[in-house]
Amino acid sequence: MIRRTFLTHALGVGGLALLPGWLRAQSMDHSMHDMAGMDHSMSTPLPQGLAATDALPRGAALGPLHRLSNQSSQPGLFKAELSAAPVQVELLPGQPTTFWAYNASIPGPLIEVNEGDRVEVRFINRLSQPSTVHWHGLPVPPEQDGNPHDPVPPGGERTYSFNLPKGSAGTYWYHPHPHGHTAEQAFRGLAAPFIVRASDDPLSGISERHLLLSDLKLNADGSIPDNDANDWMNGREGQFVLINGQHQPTLELHGPERWRLWNACSARYLRLNLGGHSFSLVGSDGGLLEQPQAMTEILLAPAERIEIIVQPGSEQRQFALTAEIYDRNKMGSVAAEQVITLARISLSAGQAVSLPTTLRSIADLGPASAHKRVVFSENMRMDNGQHQMDFLVNGKSFDMQRVDLTSKLGEVELWELVNDSHMDHPFHIHGCQFQVIEHELNGVKTPAPYRAWKDTINLRPRETIRVKMAQPFKGLRMFHCHILEHENQGMMGMLEVI
Ligand code: C2O
Ligand code: CU
Ligand code: CU
């Protein structure tokens, strides 16, 4: 069951056809909601100019994601139009916020297709900057993947088209990737979910719910500030974390649910906890795991996605979905990390659904015949009397004209990912999914606890992670840190597949 009541309500409020439903409805509900609550999030004083942490209403029922509707009636073809444009949303009463949004929706609309489908999206850029649409995690050819080399100029358009093969079912997203503007376009609102479904999904009988987590830094006057020096250094974190564009929504569960979660924040790590209630991890970035994994918390680094099953218990329970404290070793004098309340959950007592012991089989990629090494590092230097930070891959800053690594089409490779710095960095590579083999920290090697497909993996300071992958297409691929400020400042490299 995906709750539709909220959408109906939002659209019923009247005449603001292009505004995102949740945000609009929330601002309408502003005066009706009791602000008292058990909020223990971010009580530290905020930098001057930012909106207070209680400035956004909270507590409304979580609405479903907006959907991008399919204009094609041809089976196996998904065809739609997507525009990136500024849109005004009244979050703070009388102080409209200008977001940059896909089809006027925050977050952008969900694209939902089936394995085997062809996707054709006509993209229109109504921003004042070049943009692209990057299909994060999906196996699409490089020339369709929104590389910084293929910008769509302001006022321009292009059609992205690709086929999604059997085996690609999973939870993905799309966002801009233009040279030098990715971080800004994402934090101003351009990020959206993408789901590929399989016809033989063993969990298809369980009600599904979607939670796209994004970060919002908002000024008291309703504007979205530019990045400051601290944002550029540590990655941008705002004073609000939104779910499907809503602040601290309420979720009512009346039975087992399958949740898909996206960390679409620029830099925020989400150590998710369901009030200690245990859940089963069933999917990662690239679809289902082999076996469900029981857990009570999970760290979701920026750009990672998971699927979990939340089961009812023997008695009714109320708790918060929180992001617990996670220390990612930020630099400089930053506020102490705080627990963040993301949502309030009310769980009815009920019967748990029994999960299949095997969800699918994931074949080992087999022995690697090539080897690669990627080292993330930071370098502090003085520039005109100012401390300047460089974020580097293999000692170099990103250059669009330089190929850093070369792979052969289809060859199984072992990649050694090294974090030679004192801050966490999430590694991401375009156009393929990898299998984690092992982690190594302080000389201790830990094998991956289960086999899974991933396109993003966090590297702790001084950690090495070994992964295996094979490239499905020829052409140019980006790999980078998914703290978008770091990517923007050069922590990105280029792979050429020949
Ligand atoms: Cu989310 Cu270069 O990607
Ligand atoms: Cu990507
Ligand atoms: Cu980084």
Image: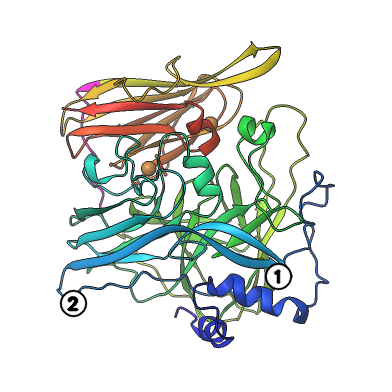
How busy is the neighbourhood of tag 1: few (under 14 within 10 Å), some, or many (20 plus)?
many
Q: Is residue 299 visible?
A: no
Three-letter amino acid code at disc 2? Ser
Magenta region, main secondary structure:
loop
Q: Is residue 366 magenta?
A: yes
- Give residue 150's quadrant in the image: top left
| Residue in the image at 78% along x and 39% along y | 335
> Is 407 left, or right, of 222 in this rendering?
left
Q: Which quadrant of the rendered structure holds the N terminus?
A: bottom left
Q: Is residue 132 above or below residue 438?
A: below
Q: Which label number is shown at residue 58?
A: 1
Q: How many marks?
A: 2
Label 1 – label 2 distance at C-alpha: 39 Å
Crowding around mark 2 (Cα neighbors within 10 Å: few <14, some 14 to 19, many 20+) is few
> Where in the figure is residue 339, as x and y percent of width and height?
73, 51
Q: Nearer the viewer, residue 431 or 413?
A: 431
Task: Kindly tell me whether mark 1's CB lies below 8 Å from ligand 1.
Answer: no
Residue 88, placed above or below residue 448: below
Q: Is residue 41 left or right of residue 308?
A: right
* Residue 349 point in image, percent of width and height: 60, 81
| Quadrant assignment, res 16 | bottom right
Q: Does the rendering let one see residue 22?
A: yes
- Tell me which colouring the rendered structure shows: rainbow
- Residue 234: mark in rendering: none
Q: Is residue 312 left or right of residue 135?
A: right
Q: On the picture, is 403 further left or further right than 46? A: left
Location of ligand 1 given as a quarter of the image? top left
- Amino acid type at circle 1 is Arg
Q: Which residues are magenta?
A: 361-370
The residue indicated by pointer 2 is 73
